[in-house]
Image (cartoon, grey):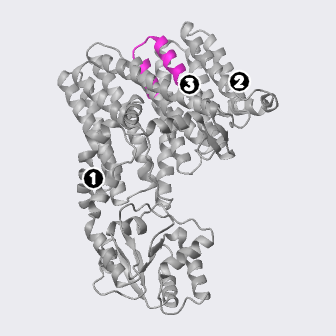
């Protein structure tokens, strides 16, 4: 329940009461500031409350943006201010100040605006939504009121609301082929009471059916899979548009949207590999390679963004050039397309699935993702090298969490703290890259079952500890997590391929999928300001170096068939641990009233 306290002189013919009721507010009326303070105190502390000037003139959507967004404890527009439970104390304190300063007389000017001024004076953060062309005003005289009402009548706020439901920055395919109609699907869903989480779940189910169709290995199945994958993507766009259209944001919803995207894409890869196997073509190595490459691309995105999230003096000639290119229309779309965002990527996969073979689909996917990864990473390296930035302790902690170091690497890091201080600034990523290449190339260039990959894994654990032995504040230290991801995933891929036994690569696919889920979960916890997963979870699944060492030990001690079984068992164990803890955490966060969020995630 939400309560709106109307203050000020009522205006005949005003629609403010009806507008507030349409937004779910229960109404109270105060004749002066003292009565408004009394009414405010009577509203239960676990409810949203709003102070609204009775003379307010504006669009309903302006009120919706200002008074119902669940992401902000305090928010305001001209003539109205609102507080969720987390912001009630600050609002009450500001209201008390107004009364103590002599504001308890009959209201002439806007109490809501005076309270907002008091909140600003206290240094309290108050969200002010961008209204654009929407009207929100408290007219001072009849002429101004008539002009405001005419401005309201001249603009269709529903059209504005529908347009703003579309993500501001999207890929070409999404912008021109999906959003022109998916926004209307979002409105249809909103008017029938459907939630973004329900649409997200429908998108997941559709993608899983698409994967099942691809797994049939028939041409009809491949065509159906391509069509259903596009349908799943339409729903994937719709859930975010529904959240923005109806302001239904939540921590659980952001997590579901982000993790389901990965689950859908990687399940589809598995379906394609199964379908190819039915036709006598083994493409599991390509499927696993595509998942590894795509996951490492995302880790590059996450690490770079976290490293520069709150950096100061964050300037770069390369960034300035990028901004200049973005001012030219056609370069914007070219640059968004060549990074192969999820919209272009899924469209390519769907078309190639329906028209060609799984092997060709994976070849195209690998080439496209490799080019996109090279382009984006090179650009970010140039930005980092030319950027004068001071990175914070928060950024260093986030990169350390993304590194996912286990007990072995942490032990080496503690032992090597003093030597690490003497290394040059670029040492951390260089050491991480060297250690990763050592273990992956050793596994690739030696026979399966030999001891050398195990020795290389020990060297990798040592270099991993050295890479994180000092705070990751260097210009290129954001490369450490993606190098570690590539080393771990690459080792699993190479050893499973070298085993050369049926079922080893699918088992490796399952293990990498489980570990990748853990790494994505870590990212979304950090993005939601919830911190990294608990230390016991990282220890229990070994950290990246522990899992790499375990896989090389299994390869050295077991036969190829036994290695396949062991790899399957490890995949199941890791999946169970990370899934149970992740689901427990996000459901508890949702039920515990954690601040609502809306993570735009990967550009669609």
How far across and down, in percent of the image, does residue 238 sit?
Answer: 30, 48
| Label 2: how many Cα within 10 Å (few below 14, some 14–19, many 20+) | many
Foreground of the two, 505 or 315 = 315
Q: In which quarter of the image is residue 78?
A: bottom left
Q: Name the residue under label 1.
A: 186
Residues drawn in magenta: 487-511
Secondary structure mainly formed by the magenta segment: helix
Q: Depth check: 602 or 559 in front? A: 602
Which residue is located at x 65 percent, y 20 percent?
435
**Percent coordinates x, y for residue 315 in the rendering:** 61, 40
The label number, if any, that marks residue 571 in the structure image:
none
Say the numbered circle drawn on residue 488.
3
Of the residues tagged 1 and 2, which is closer to the observer?
A: 1
Identified at 72% across, 27% down, the residue is 466
Give the x, y percent position of residue 153.
Answer: 26, 70
Q: Distance between the residues labelled 2 and 3?
A: 14 Å
Q: Is residue 345 visible?
A: yes
Residue at mark 2: 462
Label 2 sits on a secondary structure element that is: helix
Q: Between disc 2 and disc 3, whose residue precedes?
A: 2
Between residues 366 and 484, which one lies in front from this camera angle? 366
Residue 489 on the magenta segment: yes
In the rendered structure, does residue 353 fall within the stretch colored magenta? no
Mark 3 and mark 1 lie on one chain; the one further toward the N terminus is 1
- In this rendering, would 489 be left or right of 22? right
Q: Of helix, strand and loop, which one carries label 3?
A: helix
Q: Is residue 530 above or below residue 461?
A: below
Q: In which quarter of the image is residue 429?
A: top right
Count of number-bearing discs: 3
Q: Residue at x 36, y 62 (%)?
A: 133
């Amino acid at each position: 329940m939400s309560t709106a306290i109307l203050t000020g002189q009522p205006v005949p013919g005003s629609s403010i009461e009806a507008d507030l009721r349409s937004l779910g507010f229960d109404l109270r009326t105060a004749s002066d500031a003292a009565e408004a303070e009394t009414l405010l105190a009577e509203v239960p502390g676990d409810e949203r409350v709003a102070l609204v000037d009775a003379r307010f003139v504006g669009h309903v959507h302006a009120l919706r943006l200002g008074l119902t967004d669940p992401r902000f404890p305090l928010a305001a527009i001209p003539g109205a201010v609102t507080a969720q439970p987390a912001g009630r104390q600050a609002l009450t304190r500001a209201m008390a100040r107004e009364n103590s300063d002599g504001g308890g007389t009959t209201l002439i000017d806007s109490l809501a605006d005076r309270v907002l001024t008091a909140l600003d004076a206290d240094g309290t953060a108050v969200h002010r939504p961008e209204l654009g062309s929407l009207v929100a005003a408290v007219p001072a005289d009849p002429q101004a009121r008539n002009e405001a009402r005419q401005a309201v009548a001249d603009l269709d706020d529903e059209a504005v609301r529908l347009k703003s439901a579309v993500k501001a920055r999207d890929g070409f395919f999404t912008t021109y082929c999906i959003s022109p109609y998916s926004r209307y699907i979002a409105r249809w869903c909103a008017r029938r009471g459907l939630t973004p989480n329900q649409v997200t779940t429908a998108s997941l189910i559709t993608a899983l059916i698409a994967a099942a169709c691809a797994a049939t290995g028939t041409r009809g199945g491949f065509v159906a899979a391509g069509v259903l994958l596009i349908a799943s993507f339409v729903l994937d766009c719709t859930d975010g548009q529904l959240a923005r259209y109806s302001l239904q944001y939540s921590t659980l919803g952001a997590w579901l949207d982000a993790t389901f995207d990965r689950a859908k894409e990687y399940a589809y890869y598995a379906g394609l590999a199964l379908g190819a196997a039915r036709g006598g073509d083994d493409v599991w190595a390509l499927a696993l390679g595509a998942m590894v490459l795509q996951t490492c691309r995302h880790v590059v995105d996450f690490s770079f963004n976290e490293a520069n999230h709150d950096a100061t003096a964050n300037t770069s000639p390369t960034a300035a050039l990028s901004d200049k290119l973005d001012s030219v229309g056609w370069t914007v779309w070219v640059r968004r397309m060549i990074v192969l965002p999820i919209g272009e990527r899924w469209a390519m996969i769907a078309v190639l699935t329906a028209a060609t073979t799984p092997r060709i689909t994976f070849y195209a996917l690998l080439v496209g993702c490799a080019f996109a990864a090279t382009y984006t990473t090179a650009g970010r390296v140039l930005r980092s090298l030319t950027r004068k930035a001071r990175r914070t302790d928060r950024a260093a902690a986030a990169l350390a969490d993304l590194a996912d170091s286990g007990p072995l690497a942490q032990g080496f890091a503690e032992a090597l703290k003093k030597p690490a201080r003497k290394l040059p600034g670029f040492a951390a990523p260089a050491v991480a890259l060297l250690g990763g290449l050592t273990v992956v190339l050793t596994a690739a260039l030696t026979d399966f079952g030999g001891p050398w990959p195990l020795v290389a894994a020990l060297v990798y654990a040592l270099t991993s500890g050295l890479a994180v032995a000092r705070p990751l504040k260097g210009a290129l230290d954001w490369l450490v997590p993606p190098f570690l991801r590539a080393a771990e995933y690459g080792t699993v891929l190479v050893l499973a391929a070298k085993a050369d036994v049926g079922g080893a690569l699918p088992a490796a696919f399952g293990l990498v999928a489980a570990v990748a889920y853990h790494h994505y979960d870590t990212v979304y916890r950090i993005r939601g300001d919830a911190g990294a997963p608990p230390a016991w979870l990282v220890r229990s699944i070994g950290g990246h170096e522990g899992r790499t060492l375990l896989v090389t030990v299994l390869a050295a001690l077991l036969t190829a068939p036994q290695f396949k079984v062991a790899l399957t068992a490890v995949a199941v164990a890791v999946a169970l641990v990370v899934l149970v803890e992740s689901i427990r955490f996000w459901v508890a966060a949702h039920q515990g009233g954690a601040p609502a969020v809306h993570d735009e995630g990967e550009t669609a």
